[in-house]
Amino acid sequence: MLLGAATAWAQTDSVAPRELSAWDRLHVGGYGEAVYSRNFYSDNYLRYTQPDKYKDDSHGRFDLPHVVIYLGYDFGRGWSMSSEIEFEHGGTESAVEIETEEAGEYEKEIERGGEVALEQFYIQKEFMPQLRLRAGMQVVPIGATNARHELDQFFGVYRPEGENTILPCTWHEVAVSLSGRAGKWEYMAMFLSGLDSERFGNQGWIHDGSASPFEFKIANNYAFAGRVDNHSVPGLRIGLSGYVGNSFRNTLYPTSADKNKGVHGTVTIASVDFKYADYGWIARGYFDWGHLSDSKHISEFNISMSKNSTSKRQEVASDAICAGVEAGYDIFRLIPRMEADGQKFYVFGRYDYYDSMAKMEKSTALEWCGRHKISAGVNWYPIRQIMIKGEYTYGILDKKYNNEPAINIGIAYSGWFK
C-alpha cells in the first residue's frame, strides 16, 4: 500500500508558507527481498496423485519474490500521482542464441521466467482528509495481505499462505475509489471490473481470476469492494472488508448459448483482520470466507474448454476459506543497549489454515487442497528499514499425503528513499 504523498506546503511558526520545489514533491521508495528455501518435500506435479512415489524428495531454491519501486509526485492543490512497479522472481529475461544443432539458426530463448508488472498507477485528488478520489490501477484492499502487503507487515519470509493461495495477491485492478479517514475510522469504497471465471481452479480458487492474457482488462462484468478500519483501542486496528461481483462471461468472446443464460458466477468475499502492537508485542490475524455461485456450471464449462484456452480446465469450489494468526515479541526490548540502538529482534509463531475447496456443489473436493501450517522463527531489524528473517514451517495435509516441512531464510528492505 503506497504511503500518502507529503503535504505541498511547509510552514514554521515564524516563516510564511513556502511552496515545495519539484524535487521535494517527488517521492521514491520501495521494498525487496532475497530468499533461500529448503523444502523437504517433492515439487513434482504428481506428488498429490502419487504421494508414495515422492515421499523422500526435497529441493532447494534461491529467489527474489518481490522487488518493488514506488514513485509518487505531489502536484499541489490536493492532486498527486502514485505508482508501483513490481519485479517478481527477478523479472523476465531473454537472449538470442545460435543453435549449433539446428544449422546455426538464431533462436530467442527465455532466460528467466519471472514477471514485471505495473501494480499501481493512479491519480488522486484529496478534497479533505475525510475524502479522497482515486482513479487508475489500485490495490483491492480485500483481506489483510492485500491491504498491507509490504514485507514488514508479516513475520514470515513469504506472504501468509492462505490469502496468497485463494485470493489474487497482490490484487490490483483499474478502478475508481473513494477513501478517507475521520477520527478513529478509515474507509475505502471501490468500483472495479469483475473477475474472469474461466481462470478459476481447484488449488487457487479465484486466485488467477484477476489476471488478463490480453493487453487490456475485460470489463463485461463489474464489481464493488469496500474496507473499513477502526483504531479506537490504543495499539489495536480492526478491519472489515468485502467484495461482490459477477465473473461468468467476463471474457473477450462471451458465450451466448441458451444453456448458459442466467449463470452469473457471483463472487462474494467477507474478511476480518486485526493487528495489535504494544509493549514489545505484535499480533496479527485474519479470517476470509468466499462463495462462488453457479460453481458446478462453471466447473463443467471450464473443463469442456479447448486445451488452447487460458482456462485451467479444472473444477472450482463453491466456497473457500482461510484463517491465520501470528504473534511475536521483541526480545531486544529487554536489553537496554540494543533498544537504545533502535534494533529489534522478534521471536514469533504462526498458524494458518486454508481450503480452496471447502465446499463443493454436487462434487467431491480434493483433500490435499485443505491444509494446516505452523511456523516459528525470528525477524531481526538491525536498522528500521532492513529485515533479516528466518523460519521453520510445517505444512500438515490429510494423512494420505506427505506433509511439507521447509526452512526459509530471507533479507529484505522496506521504506522510502526520499
Image (spheres, rainbow, N blue to C red):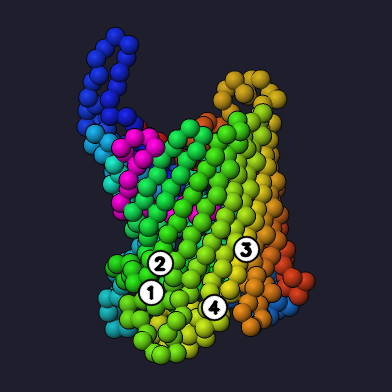
Q: Residue at x 55, y 49 (%)?
A: 240
The type of residue carrying mark 4 is: Ser
Mark 3 to mark 1: distance in Å?
24 Å
Quadrant of the image for the C terminus?
top left
- Which residue position is annotated with label 3? 321
Q: For residue 174, what is the image quadrant?
A: bottom left
Residue linked to disc 2? 194
> Looking at the image, is mark 2 or mark 4 earlier in the sequence?
2
Magenta stretch: includes residue 133: yes
- Above or below residue 71? Residue 114 is below
The span from disc 1 to disc 2 (Cα, nearest Å) is 7 Å
Q: Height in image: 260 above or below 97?
A: below
- Start and end of the magenta stretch? 126-143
Q: Is residue 69 visible?
A: no
Question: Mark 2: which amino acid?
Answer: Gly
The quarter in which the N terminus is drawn is top left
Mark 4 lies on residue: 295
* Residue displayed at 63% across by 24% down: 338
Q: Return the residue found at the far top.
A: 14
* x and y percentages locating residue 284 in the rendered image: 62, 44
Q: Amino acid at mark 3?
A: Ile
- For the residue labelled by badge 4, is the local secondary structure a helix, a strand or a loop? helix
Q: Earlier in the sequence, mark 3 or mark 4?
A: 4
Dot 3: what SS?
Answer: strand
Q: Which badge, 3 or 1, is on the more N-terminal residue?
A: 1
**Residue at 66% in and 46% down:** 326
- The residue wearing badge 1 is 250
| Among numbered discs 1 and 2, the one appearing first in the sequence | 2
Between 224 and 62, the one nearer to me in the picture = 224
For marks 3 and 4, give the CA distance.
15 Å
